[in-house]
Amino acid sequence: MKQTTRHQEIVNLVQKNGYVSTESLVEHFNVSPQTIRRDLNELADENKIRRHHGGATTQQSSVNSSYHDRKSRQSDVKDAIAQALVKYIPDGATLFIDIGTTPEYIAKELVKNHKGLRIVTNNINVASILMTNDDFKVILAGGEVRNRDGGIVGEATLDFIKQFRLDFGIIGISGIDYDGSLLDFDYHEVRVKQAIIENSRSVFLAVDHTKFGRNAMVNLGNISELDMLITDLTPPNEIVSILKEHNIPLEVINNQTTEQAD
């Protein structure tokens, strides 16, 4: 395969998946790791991708990929992450569930066996899933409904969330930078996420590995504000160091271990 053809296919894969690892590209193209690293460096120099340890992410930071694409991407991984997270939610708990495709997978897991949950959400899709369990009390925030993904945002949503003080906050995120910054694309959505963090006794973030190093334009906080991070692959060393520094548990589902700094 010609280099130009390979470069374009790499860009297409990054745009489709949000993140691609060097290892997966080596296997996909059947070339050496040195060749792929050179390709990624050249594409990054041309501002076509964003290079980082172990792979590449999309360069674009102002617009997220479509809801349909995000919902189908990494579906098996998101399902496994959701199964891991719901084990930490006891029956009878109160919780916020945020906008995002991973929170929707978490909602699907909660309805299976949990009892007596009281949930506040600004996600119409999550509310529709949770209402199938007759033992749950579901409270849907008011505000402006986004047609593209069923999220509810705006000043009314913000004011509504601030009325509550709940046991758990389950948030979605678009990217985590190497300095621990939690990143998203929509300023209005970010304000609601911040309110959820501020009004939750414990904050859980469940993300697949494609979010590490991914770029987005709005900073909503830092991973040091979390109480647990659950993911499918060990994060980059910079992020692991921040988690250990703040004694935040990290569960990596591929090896089924929970790590925490001593």
Image: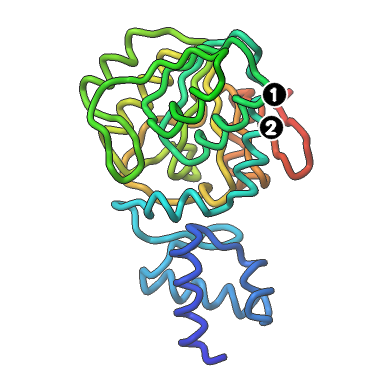
Q: Position of residue 115 (x, y in %)?
A: 63, 13
Residue that carries the numbered disc 2 in the rendered image: 84
Q: Residue at x 52, y 53 (%)?
A: 72
Quadrant of residue 108 within the rendered picture: top right
Mark 1: amino acid: Lys
Residues 7 and 148: in front is 148
Q: Position of residue 70 (x, y in %)?
A: 46, 51
Marks 2 and 1, Cα distance to the nearest angstrom? 6 Å
Q: Position of residue 147 (x, y in %)?
A: 28, 42
Please tell me whether mark 1 sits on a helix, a strand or a loop.
Answer: loop
Please tell me whether mark 2 sits on a helix, a strand or a loop.
Answer: helix
Q: Which residue is drawn at 50% across and 35% down?
A: 104
Q: Is residue 26 above or below residue 88?
A: below
Residue count near mark 2 (Cα–Cα under 10 Å), binned few <14, some 14–19, many ≥20: some
* Residue 124 tag number: none
Quadrant position of the C terminus in the picture? top right
Question: Does residue 155 appear left or right of residue 235 in this picture?
Answer: left
Q: Do the residues labelled 2 and 1 touch (CB within 8 Å)?
A: yes
Residue that carries the numbered disc 1 in the rendered image: 87
Quadrant of residue 99 within the rendered picture: top left
Mark 2: amino acid: Ala
Question: Does residue 231 appear left or right of residue 143 in this picture?
Answer: right
Q: Which residue is drawn at 50% across and 74% down?
A: 10
Q: Is residue 225 above or below residue 2?
A: above
Q: Where is residue 171 in the image (x, y as percent from the top left)?
A: 47, 29
Q: Which residue is drawn at 52% across and 21% down?
A: 203
